[in-house]
Each structure stands twice: as C-alpha cells, then as structure tokens.
Amino acid sequence: LEIYNEEVRDLLSKQATNKLELKEDPQSGVYVKDLTSYVVKSVAECDKLRGFGAKNRHVGATKMNQESSRSHSIYSITVESC
C-alpha cells in the first residue's frame, strides 16, 4: 500500500488510483479494507510483485534526485511453513 497526501492506495491493484479505507476490528485490529493480497511460492514471484507495486508509486524529480519518492509505502509479507 502507499500513503500519499493522506490517502491510502493499493499498489498491487489493477486500479491503483482507487482510494482505500482504514478500518478497525475488535478481534484483528486495524486493517485496510479491500487491500490486494497474493500467495507466492518463490522469492522471484515476491520480487515481481514488489516491482509491480514500485512502478505504481508517486515519484517526482528534485534537484538532488531524479525519481524522488513522494509517498510512504508499506509491504507486508507473511511467511508460512508446512
């Protein structure tokens, strides 16, 4: 997800411009409603998704950096073993 200008966006969504809402559940705590999630089976698959999300981030040029980030991004990874 990306936080930009106080708006939350899903970087892995096909419509990454859609704004998402923060919700709170007494059992599970704070979460982002309708946030996209994927099951991956390799580091390569994980890296491909991270790259896709990175392309959707807000960036802009500054005097010091040609592609300066204009947002904060959060990637959550859950590792499960059999």
Image (cartoon, rainbow, N blue to C red):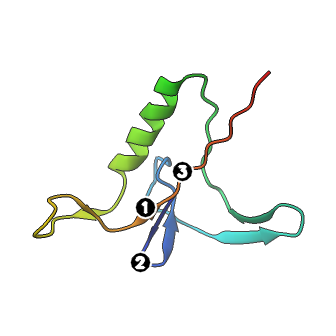
Q: Nearer the viewer, mark 1 or mark 3?
A: 3
Residue 75's tag is: 3
Q: Is residue 16 left or right of residue 29?
A: left
Q: Nearer the viewer, mark 2 or mark 1?
A: 2
Q: Is residue 56 left or right of residue 12?
A: left
Kindly identify which residue carries mark 2: 5
Residue 71: quarter of image = bottom left
Residue 34: x percent and y percent? 65, 56
Whichever of labels 1 and 3 marks the residue nearer the N terminus, that label is 1
Q: Are marks 1 and 3 in contact (CB under 8 Å)?
A: no
**Residue 3 against residue 55 in the figure, above or below:** below
**Residue at screen point 61% across, 23% down:** 41
Residue 82: quarter of image = top right
At numbered mark 2, what does the secondary structure look like: helix, strand or loop?
loop
Residue 17's tag is: 1
At numbered mark 1, what does the secondary structure look like: helix, strand or loop?
loop
Q: Are marks 2 and 1 in contact (CB under 8 Å)?
A: no
At numbered mark 3, what does the secondary structure look like: helix, strand or loop?
loop
Amino acid on which disc 3 is placed: Tyr
Amino acid on which disc 1 is placed: Thr
Circle 2 Cα neighbour tier, 10 Å, few/some/many (<14 / 14–19 / ≥20): few
Q: Say which of 25 and 33 sits in front.
A: 25
Amino acid on which disc 2 is placed: Asn
Whichever of labels 2 and 3 marks the residue nearer the N terminus, that label is 2
Whichever of labels 2 and 1 marks the residue nearer the N terminus, that label is 2
**Residue at screen point 37% across, 48% down:** 54
**Residue 75 against residue 60 in the figure, above or below:** above
**Residue with the most extreme right position:** 27
